[in-house]
Amino acid sequence: PTDAGENLDTDGDGFCDNADADDDGDGYFDYNDLFPLDGTEWADFDGDGTGDNADLDDDEDGCLDEDDDLPYDASDCSDLDGDGVGDSTDPDDDGDNVMDDVDPFPEDGSAWADNDGDGDPDFTGDPPFLGNFEGGAIPAGWSTYGSAPWFACGTTVSCGTANGSAINGSYSAESGDISDSQTSSLEVTMMTLAGDVSFSYETSTEYYWDYLRFYVDGSLAMSWSGVTAGTHTHTVAAGWHTFEWMYYKDGSVSSNADTVWVDDITMPVSQTLNQSDMDDDNDGIADEFDLDPYDPCVSADTDGDGSPDWVMSGTIDMSGLGLEEFIVDCDASMWMEDWDDDGDGWADELEMICGSDWLDGMDYPYDGDGDWICDAMDHDLDDDGHMNPLEDCSLLYEEGEDAVVDCIADGFRSVDADSDGDITYMELIHAFYFQNDWSEDEDDDWDDDWDDDWDDESGNDTDDEVGTMSHDGTNDTHDDMDDANGTDDDMDDANGTDDDMDDANGTDDDWDDDMVCYNMWTHTVNNDSESECSGYGWYENASFGGVENFTGCYNIVSHVVTTDDADSCVMYMWVSTSGGPGDGDGHDDGHDDGHDDGDGDDGGEPMAWPSAEDMALFEDLFWDYYIAWDNDSSGSFSFDEYWTIGVDEGDIPSELTNPGWSAGSTDWDQFPYDQAEWSDTDLDGIGDNTDNDDDGDGVPDSQDEFPLDGSESSDLDGDGIGDNSDDDIDGDGVDNSDDDFDSDPGAAADNDGDGLDDASDADDDNDGVPDVADWSPLDQDCIANPMGCEQYDTDGDGVGDNADTDDDTCPAAADATTGATCNEGYYPGDGVEDANDAFHLDPSETTDSDGDGIGDNADPDDDNDNVPDGLDAFDFDATESRDTDGDGVGDNADPDMDGDGYLNSDDAFPLNEMEWIDTDGDNIGDNSDSDDDGDGVIDTDDFAPLDSKQWMDTDGDGMGDNDGADYPNGDTDDDNDGFSDAEEDDCGTDSKSAASQPSDFDGDGLCDAKDATDDRAEKLDGQEEPGFTPGFPSVLAAISLLGAAVLGRRKED
């Protein structure tokens, strides 16, 4: 109303429209506002006269904005991947970096491959990172900003490159069209692996002024200007990184195409993929096991050698829909089928015959001798040139039934060692142990032929035992190990008792000492030094078992100890490992004098076989079951009985005819798994090549004084009577029963039984006192009870120390009873009886208060509290050593150590009777401290000497001057003049002087220093400042022109 030139203010902002740059107040200047008088509208993209805010279809393409991915692009409504390029023109609708024309799932950004065309994607997950812009747009997830955005140029938008094309492929990224002093940036933030980031670039700019800049995590890594092109590589660590390509222009001059381009950006990113189609080539082999999961012609590669287990022939339609692009001609395949699928060295065909799994590299045909003939087909299992029958006769069916029958008969002949047509107990147990490969039976599966032997045919939940067998000749005729009287004394001595292997007392412990479970068929060199040869034999230049000039640690019979419990000894042999008087077992099992005595300790010496455990195991697993077929109770098996067992057990087909027994001409290998042995004439378990003990008594013939007598082997005294029968083995005239050293003719008596003969023993009664100093060196009482006899008399009073009540005191006169006198020059003693004397052998000491072994007379610290007695207020009290206040109560127990009347717990100085309080904690007691509260003001000048927050009270009202949040009890008006300290500080007066008060000219309660109007006839101020600078746009324009002139002048200079 006061301006005649203005009459309208549309937005009511106080500025008339003629002067208002934004009449409708919508934030858009009128010259940019299509609706300058409508505060709700400013743009009309489709020019239909309806503002975009109200227009439901801004681009007039027929798609409502709420359904339109591109509401300002009339050419398309859909943008599946949100890259700003409509699907109708986007070569990669789903933004997975795989072009639609080769993408079987063009509208699924997480799937892009379907090798077999079955509609199930090979995998889903993160699309591959491809910074080649072949999608025809800046990819989703990238950002472009600055004065103008980057865009994809190439096929649809011509690039400004030298040839007008993309750097590579169909598209490149081109910087926005910017002017001087502007920038255009392309940026992407990615989680990368450690590695190289690379890209191609091209620039066409003003040399040395306009640049393509490459930033990594905000730091400039490289820049280029002028006309140039190339490839750049930058190494990054693993983690999140921001990469920026910026076109930067200086303030003036443009040259060349004034643009930059980048293409083929690669980054070391990790893709997360999830298997969707588990069989991408639809060949029935899951991808994880398929050598080539995209080729249906090849299968798995079990051994990973690069050759498929098999190769298909003909054509295969992976899709099953007859689609040509999914039909593969396998006949044209270049793959070669693997002859050994599991890579174990055995051909698949052989493994099928030998019964192993040709697809399991850990399951291969057993080949004990390593001749590449599996044991099931091998006629010479140990490759020693001596035949053994086949394990599986069914393999000979192709040769005819006669070959199979002969093979079965050979199984009998190989066990019938003497070829008499009858298999005895010893022949069977020998074959059981030495003609079976126990190493194949580690799971108690002894042999397929015996699987049914343990069945519970009667259904009573226990293994059937059919028939029993004893070996004492009482209930059977099995006398193979018996003599003519039917008792088992073939291995007995002349008296008919089984003590050939017993000691002199008739107990069977000659060989019953240290027993262990052994694998009898393993021969292993263990260590290469004698000191490391533990539990085996050390040999030097030895020869045995085909080994010549051997030096090393070797167990000639076995080396695997599996258990030390006979009941747990499964599949192996329970055998003796040591013997002889020197082995510590207390059993008389022969000499430990370096001779082979059967105890298992000597080099090359075999173990005794069969032991009772060997026979028990054999009978439990074999004999007790098969003896049921011993129809004539002979304790052995004829060929007919053998054939019947095979038929009944299903091991011999019933259609085969029993040929009857006939002696063969083959010398069968009795040790088919031991290359060094093939025969054992005496069936002692030791092959003839190794056996050097004719009489089987465990002593080599070369060391046997009676090589033909199994009950004797040594004659120590050379009297012609074997030691086992000799009453005086060492010939010293003392019977063995009275001779403590029956193997030593130079020694007989050992009074204390310590193993030393009395002639060389320095302490015959073993009481700890040498014979030369012992009252009674042969006192048997001292042997049984050393404290029950006497060896010493310390004080020489004629009474032994054990009986003397005061060992260190000797009476001056001779003892009335014994007549004994004190030792010459001996100290008279302390007169304290031993019961009360801590040092009953030391007359200078009687007590030891702290029990440290030092008598109190000599101990500088009697109570052992680490305080010398001279400094200890309590010599005999280890809990106290000091009494500060001298009240007789030690400091450790005294509640007021300095006696100042304050308990230690309340006393800041418990050892200083002059101090007890330290208000400021400066370690100076208040009685001595000139500034008790530590506020820097001495107590005499301090209004509150015990309050560190107050020290002055200006108006004397009892309240300290300091106030505020940290001073809750402070005075807010220090000078008590009615004006608060804060008010006086604001008004410029002295808050600590009552005479200095703020002035208030107009009396309105606001001091003049703060009052903008100090006259009582206050007038309203003039019109409020408009808040803007009139003509501001013109000022900006002037400054801009001035700046351009300056810059131009700089370049011209």
Image (tube, helix red, strand yellow):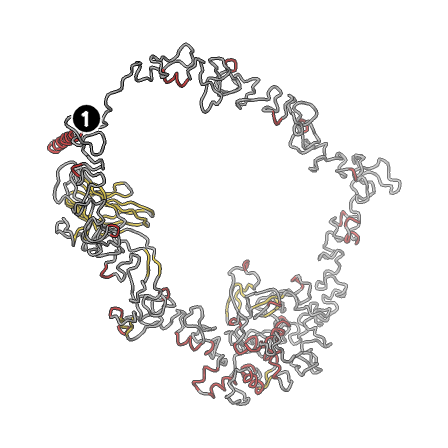
Q: Most extreme residue toward the right, as rendered?
A: 816
Q: Is residue 493 above or below residue 565?
A: below
Quadrant in which the N terminus appears = top left
| Other-residue count near label 1 (Cα within 10 Å), few / some / many at <14 / 14–19 / ≥20 | few
- What secondary structure is marked by label 1? loop
Residue at 53% over, 24% down: 921
Residue 126 in the image: state x and y as whole percent: 31, 55
Number of marks: 1
Q: Is residue 840 above or below residue 490?
A: above
Q: Most extreme residue toward the top, as rendered?
A: 995
Quadrant in which the C terminus appears = top left
Camera-nearest residue between 125 and 1051: 125
Q: Is residue 704 above or below residue 870?
A: below
Q: Would residue 226 appear left or right of 977 to someone viewing this image? A: left
Residue at 50% over, 88% down: 655
Residue 173 in the image: state x and y as whole percent: 20, 49
Q: Residue 8 appears in which quarter of the rendering?
A: top left
Camera-nearest residue between 678 and 262: 262
Q: Residue 848 appears in which quarter of the rendering?
A: top right
Camera-nearest residue between 245 and 576: 245
Residue 964 in the image: state x and y as whole percent: 44, 22
Is residue 753 at least partly visible in the picture?
A: yes
User: Which residue bears the numbered disc 1?
Assistant: 1
Is residue 733 at least partly visible in the picture?
A: no
Camera-nearest residue between 407 and 610: 407
